[in-house]
């Protein structure tokens, strides 16, 4: 029984030793990761993703570095602007390991170092910028921080990809002053917009009045032209009718008995008009021959004879 127990224990121990050797020997490196291998305490090689075999108890995995992009929250810090205004700024830093050897042996903790370097660089950049520019030129400030960080982190095997200012905290007094300034700016813009609207309205009204006057003058002009053309046409038609009437009278006079008819018509008109003169109270001085109807008719007949 004792021999069987000793054999079982040895078998179990041997199996455990084999498992330990296998665990020490075989290594599977995940995608986008690097294993830094040390042999007897000295750097040996860097393992990329895949299956690898190590020498048990001689080779060991000293560092495991991820090649994925990492996000580091940069804690809030107090910065003083160029115009001596203290602001609180926190940001977000994006970095990536591009050399596992330098990231392992170039610095003790590259994440902490990158965060601290981002804070000091931000204080330096903000100290050269006015308060108003910190809001207007965030992109330019972020680029300056990234440039400075990338140069400093290059010996660490780190690539600084981006830095973003996530928040800028202002003192209460500065907030009130900025709010008053923005309120005044909004009121100024509203006043300008109102005056521009009134100005445009006045221009529109004057343009409408101007167009109305032009339209009225054009209408009056057309009216006068039409009336003139109508009067001219009327005169023309009257003249034509008068000429035709005179022409017919002349023809009728030359017809047999035409002169007698004319004499009779003249005598009738003479008597009629002379009767009207008799009804008036005014005293008229008339030629003596006009009282003789026959003489007047004869005179008119003589005129018609010459008119022929």
Image (spheres, rainbow, N blue to C red):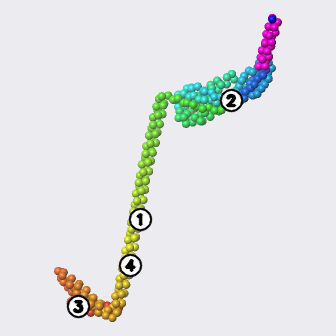
**Bounds of the magenta segment:** 2-24
Image spot of residue 157 (x, y percent)? 71, 28
For disc 1, the marked residue is: 218
Q: Spatial distance from mark 1 to mark 3, Cα to Cα?
A: 59 Å
**Quadrant in which residue 280 is drawn:** bottom left
Picture residue at 36% right of the left edge, 90% below the top: 251
Tally the numbered discs. 4
The mark that comes first in sequence, 4 or 1, is 1
Q: Is residue 58 magenta?
A: no
The mark that comes first in sequence, 2 or 4, is 2
Mark 1 vs mark 2: give the one in front: 2
The mark that comes first in sequence, 1 or 3, is 1
Res. 248 visible in picture: yes
Q: Spatial distance from mark 1 to mark 2, Cα to Cα?
A: 82 Å
13 over 193 or under it: above or below: above
The answer to which of 30 and 213 lies nearer the viewer is: 30
Q: Spatial distance from mark 2 to mark 3, Cα to Cα?
A: 140 Å
Where's the C terminus, which quadrant?
Answer: bottom left
Residue 68: mark in rendering: 2
Image spot of residue 102 (x, y percent)? 72, 26
Q: Secondary structure at mark 1?
A: helix
For disc 3, the marked residue is: 293
For disc 4, the marked residue is: 236
Q: Spatial distance from mark 4 to mark 1, Cα to Cα?
A: 26 Å
Characterize the magenta stretch by its predominant secondary structure. Answer: helix
**Quadrant in which residue 16 is drawn:** top right
């Amino acid at each position: 029984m004792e021999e069987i127990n000793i054999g079982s224990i040895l078998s179990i121990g041997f199996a455990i030793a084999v498992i330990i050797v296998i665990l020490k020997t075989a290594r599977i490196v995940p995608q986008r990761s690097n294993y830094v291998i040390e042999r007897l305490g000295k750097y040996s090689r860097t393992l990329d993703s895949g299956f690898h075999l190590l020498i048990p108890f001689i080779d060991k995995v000293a560092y495991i570095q991820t090649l994925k992009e990492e996000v580091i929250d940069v804690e809030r810090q107090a910065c003083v602007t160029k115009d001596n205004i203290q602001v609180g700024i926190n940001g977000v830093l994006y970095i990536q390991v591009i050399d596992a050897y330098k990231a392992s042996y170039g610095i003790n903790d590259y994440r902490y170092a990158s965060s601290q370097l981002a804070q000091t660089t931000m204080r330096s950049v903000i100290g050269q910028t006015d308060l108003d520019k910190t809001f207007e030129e965030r992109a330019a400030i972020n680029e300056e921080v990234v440039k400075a960080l990338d140069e400093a982190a290059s010996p660490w095997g780190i690539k600084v990809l981006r830095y973003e200012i996530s928040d800028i905290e202002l003192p209460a007094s500065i907030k009130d002053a900025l709010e008053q300034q923005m309120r005044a700016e909004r009121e100024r813009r509203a006043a300008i917009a109102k005056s521009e609207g009134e100005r445009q309205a006045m221009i529109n009204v004057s343009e409408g009045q101007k167009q109305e006057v032009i339209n009225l003058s054009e209408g009056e002009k057309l009216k006068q032209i039409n009336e003139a053309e109508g009067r001219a046409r009327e005169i023309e038609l009257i003249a034509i009718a008068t000429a035709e009437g005179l022409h017919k009278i002349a023809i009728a006079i030359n017809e047999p008995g035409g002169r007698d008819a004319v004499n009779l018509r003249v005598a009738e008109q003479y008597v009629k008009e002379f009767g009207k003169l008799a009804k008036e109270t005014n005293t008229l001085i008339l030629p003596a021959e006009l009282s003789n109807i026959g003489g007047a008719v004869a005179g008119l007949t003589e005129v018609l004879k010459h008119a022929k």
